Image (cartoon, helix red, strand yellow):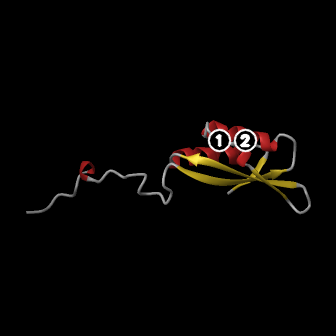
Amino acid sequence: MTKSPPSPADAPVPDPRRDSLIEYPSRFPIKVMGAKVDGFVHAVTELAHRFDPDFDASTIELRQSSAGNYLGVTITVTATSRAQLDDLYRALSSHPLVKVVL
């Protein structure tokens, strides 16, 4: 007698909480870099608020490049899921004022 392969219905349902090293919800810092221009910090702050309505702008950290042409902005959001973080990273990295998101 041959054994039939397991059906997809028998497969375990993946648990996204186990697939992540991050425990949700948690405070999650994101570094965003861009040219030092008017509106850059405001744009980053607006995106943070869109994905974390309780985002506290007073926690923003700014670091200017040595030549003063670029600005690093660290935002700390409350991460509630991997999907939320992925969507925030996509929104930040696609913004025209943003050069790098870490």
Q: Residue furthest right?
A: 67
**Image-quadrant location for residue 5:** bottom left
Q: Residue furthest left?
A: 1
Residue 53: % across, % down: 61, 36
- Quarter of the image where the N terminus is located: bottom left
Circle 2 residue: 45
Q: CA distance from mark 2 to mark 1?
A: 8 Å
Do the numbered discs 2 and 1 sit on residues whose CB atoms are within 8 Å? Answer: yes
**Image-quadrant location for residue 63:** bottom right
Q: Are there few (<14), some (14-19), or many (20+) residues within 10 Å of tag 2?
A: some
- What residue is at 92 percent from the left and 61 percent from the top? 67
Which residue type does callout 2 highlight? Answer: Thr
Q: Does residue 44 sit above or below 68 in this rendering?
A: above
- For residue 55, the mark is 1
Q: Secondary structure at mark 1?
A: loop
For residue 54, side relative to residue 99 (left or right): left
- What residue is at 69 percent from the left and 48 percent from the top? 93
- What residue is at 73 percent from the left and 45 percent from the top? 58
- What residue is at 47 percent from the left and 57 percent from the top? 20
For residue 92, side relative to residue 87 (left or right): right
Which residue type does callout 1 highlight? Answer: Phe
Residue 60: % across, % down: 73, 49
* Between discs 2 and 1, the one toward the N terminus: 2
Most foreground residue, 2 or 36: 36
Q: Does residue 30 sit above or below 52 in this rendering?
A: below
Q: Secondary structure at mark 2?
A: helix
Q: Foreground mark, 2 or 1?
A: 1
- Quarter of the image where the C terminus is located: bottom right
Most foreground residue, 50 or 3: 50
For residue 85, side relative to residue 61 (left or right): left
Residue 24: % across, % down: 49, 50
